[in-house]
Amino acid sequence: MKTVCYSLLGTQLDYAGKSENRWHKWRPNISLCMQDDLLINELVLIYQEQDRALVKQVCEDIRTVSPDTHVTFQKIPFADPWDFEEVYAKLHQFLSTQQFSETNDYFINVTTGTHVVQICWFLLTESRHFPGRLIQVSPGKNDERTKGSYQLIDLNLEKYDQIAARFKADALEGEDFLKDGIQTQNAQFNAMIRQLETVAIRSTAPILLTGPTGAGKSQLAKRIYALKKQRGHVQGQFINVNCATLRGDQAMSALFGHAKGAFTGAQQSRDGFLKAADGGILFLDEIGELGLDEQAMLLHAIEEKSFYPVGSDTIRQSRFLLIAGTNKDLSQAAEQRQFRDDLLARINIWTYHLPSLSERIEDIEPNIRYECKKYTEHHGTPVRFNAEAWEKYDEFARSPNTPWVHNFRDLNASIYRMATLAGHQRIRLDIVQQEIKRLQESWRHQGHQTQHKQTDLSDFIEDSLLEEMDLFDQGQLRFVIERCQAHPTAASASRNLFQFSRLKKSSSNDTARLKNYLAKYNLSWQKIKRI
Amino acid sequence: MEQKDYIDIDGSHGEGGGQILRTALALSMIKGQPIHLYNIRGKRPKPGLMRQHLTSVLAAATVCDADVRGAELGSQEFWFEPNEIQNGDFHFSIGSAGSTSLVCQTILPALLSAEGPSSVTFEGGTHNGMSPSLDFLESAFFPMLAKMGVEYGIERDQVGFYPVGGGKWTLRIWPIQTFKPIHLTEKPIWHTWEGRSLIEKSLPRKIATRELERLQREMTPLSLVTEIEHVQAKGPGNTLHLLSKSDTHQIMIENTGKVKKSAEKVADEVANRYQHLLKSGATIDPYLADQLLIYLALAGDGTYTTNSVTLHTQTNIETIALFIGSRFRIADLQDSCYRISYMP
């Protein structure tokens, strides 16, 4: 990696005569090369024809203070260095001829040149025509005068937490913050978020998020991090790891790091995700996919706040908040000895279930609005439906026959596709119809029925029983079976079925209620799933 | 060469600065011991490797053909695996007026245990006020090594003051089989005192005269031989040196002139430090005592007294102990006099 800096030769600031006395004066380009903790490997000095002699002098003096700096020259003549149009065009043209390598670190020294030159540097950097940062040097005091100090300015505003937080619609508070401002209606979901807000702010214990794929676990984990960061509870990073992608030998070293030479191919040591999350949040999605050995190490790391990288006997410290995500039933996995029960006990302190999208029909509309807003923020194009298109899409989205298999992931992709097809115009009916077809096809490919097909009750109960059943009861049973088929677990099916009555009870066991109902017809959850 | 395990060294231990790095590198090279340094300069406001430390690491790597990983500007840990020490001609340039004497300190023990003689040219700072100056090396440090049997030669081309640097000098050094132990415990009988003010040409000569006049006044009744040395240098600078000779050895107290610090104050500080040493009856000043520790350990025997044991010294001893066990003893002899000895 090289550090490359572009800088204008300061006709006045860099000039100090030829005598040894010139070393008494602070000169920006010399000062730039005198810093203890900054080594410019290549300095590109931009100069004017009349400063030819000065370039030589400055180059020689840089060699004295920084023998490792290689100085190259670039003549860019400005007829009028205060003429914005000319300066911008020439600097833009110059930068476009440069080959920037991703492995290098780039700076522009804005200390020298006219204000117009500085403004042009700002604009070119902010618009990413220049892939680097700005650097400003200033004179020091007393003995440090000639050496001075420097300041780095990164114009990538996303990197400034305070500015970025201000941009995030100043008023988003707590709950709203966790929901990213989506006005959700689902009572159960809202109650959960309300509690989660308190927990996120007060507790440092692990949080377990359960729910089907695409229900927004990873999104929520990110929002918890953002909330804690905004409140100053975490300083470190948010590290998002999908455990399903960690397989075999790599899993251990990816999580815990390894020492050089720990195994064949380990030519470099590696820190691992746990270390990277130090002071921040580690989100382990699909934690149920983690191997038993990794689970044991993780448990130790959570309890002791320290661990050993693979092949190293140097203990590493890391303090992180663990958020785990899963779409599996971990208690069941623990019974089958696929998941350590002691680890489960450790992470199962605050458990939150994220319902699937089809269980939160009332939240579909606010989420569509949210997805549209997000698209607008990213692409700058407003997303709007015309009336009939909206009516059609809304009806489809809320229909109990729309499974939203991948939940928010499907919804997000769907809006994205329609918005892209509509371009700058409103989304029309034909686009919506096309989209509905596309979604249904994709779900059909994955084995999910979307069109309503009459469930044949004779597949489920004995004919003798069916013959004596009122049509009223048949209809109810058929509906219940269909719901059971659409949900991954009995718990989520029953939450969906008893969505209101369960809220009125102080303690509800919806699953038992569902199972009792099915038992009346000699049916069980397992049996339905088998058929 | 047999495969040795890395030893882990916490750079934030004790004084927590660059000395741990230099001592660890020096011993790693001569012992063929791979090291992993972490929390480098952990107690400094800007931790990690600064340019002059990086030069030390790279210079050490050049001299013993080491495999180095992680040594970059600002990095707070690196791995250093030494190989065979090579003698020969070396040239090391340090940017940002980094101290050449500290780079010298890092590689010197290795060059002394090489197969043949070496010549090393250093470019950078020679008088930077935060580390022993080239004058100190010439007048106190190397003469002491000579007592231990070391043969050397120094050619001085140009001095380099902080913050510009641009100094240049060459060290010729011959390897040594066994060091002769030194035992300096008797209260010395000082007989000669020399005051020397080094001043860069662009600065007023008056500064030097004032320093020397004041130094003489403060040192009275002792009589000084004084000298003003006008030097050509890239940047401005001034240092004041007091050389004191006894029957057995010589020492140097030095100080740096600064903007907004009077010449008199520069001289007073030198005189005070010398008076303190004199009163204690110790043989050498704390800075020299510190730099000689590693050679005491290499000789396997030796004793001297000094008038202060700093955290710097403690840390240095502890770093050495990581490589060759703890055989240093420090005895408090009262009246600010401490005996440092290395037990054979």
Image: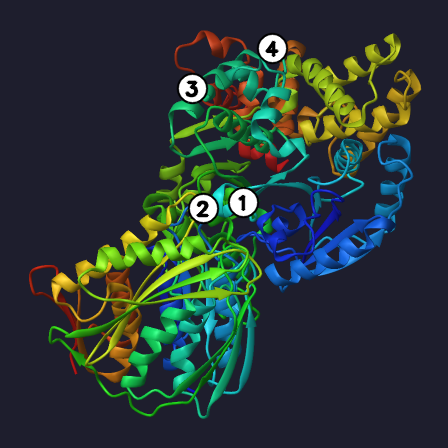
Which residue is tagged 3?
A198
Per the model, the C-alpha gap separating discs 2 and 4 is 70 Å
Q: Which residue is mark 1?
A: A145
Which residue: 73% across, 18% down? A368
Residue B20 on image: x %, y % = 35, 63
Q: Circle 4 is placed at which residue position?
A: A185
Disc 2 is placed on an element classified as loop
Query: In this figure, which residue is indicated by the disc labeled 2?
Result: B259
Q: Which of the two discs, 3 and 1, sits closer to the camera? A: 1
Q: Nearer the viewer, mark 1 or mark 2?
A: 2
Count residues near mark 3 (Cα–Cα under 10 Å), then give few for <14, some for 14-19, many for 20+. few
The picture quadrant where one finds residue A453 is top right
Contact (CB < 8 A) between labels 1 and 2?
Answer: yes
The answer for how far apart the CA atoms under marks 3 and 2 are is: 57 Å
Chain holding disc 3: A
Q: Quadrant of the N terminus of chain A?
A: bottom right
**In the rendering, at what x and y percent does residue A230 appear?**
51, 25
The C terminus of chain A is located in which quarter? top right
Q: Earlier in the sequence, mark 3 or mark 1?
A: 1
Tag 2: residue type?
Answer: Val
In the image shown, does A285 or B5 lie closer to the viewer? B5
Q: Is residue B32 visible?
A: no
Badge 3 vs badge 1, beta-carbon distance below 8 Å: no
Callout in the foreground (2, 4): 2
Q: Report crowding for label 2: few under 14, some 14 to 19, many 20 or more residues within 10 A (C-alpha).
A: few
| Amino acid at the residue labelled 3 | Thr
> Helix or strand or loop: what does disc 3 sit on?
helix
* In the displayed structure image, the side of residue A102 where residue A204 appears, left or right: left
Please indicate whether residue B217 sits to the left or right of residue A465 in the image.
Answer: left
Disc 1: CA contacts within 10 A as few (<14), some (14-19) or many (>=20): some
> Which residue type does callout 1 highlight?
Arg
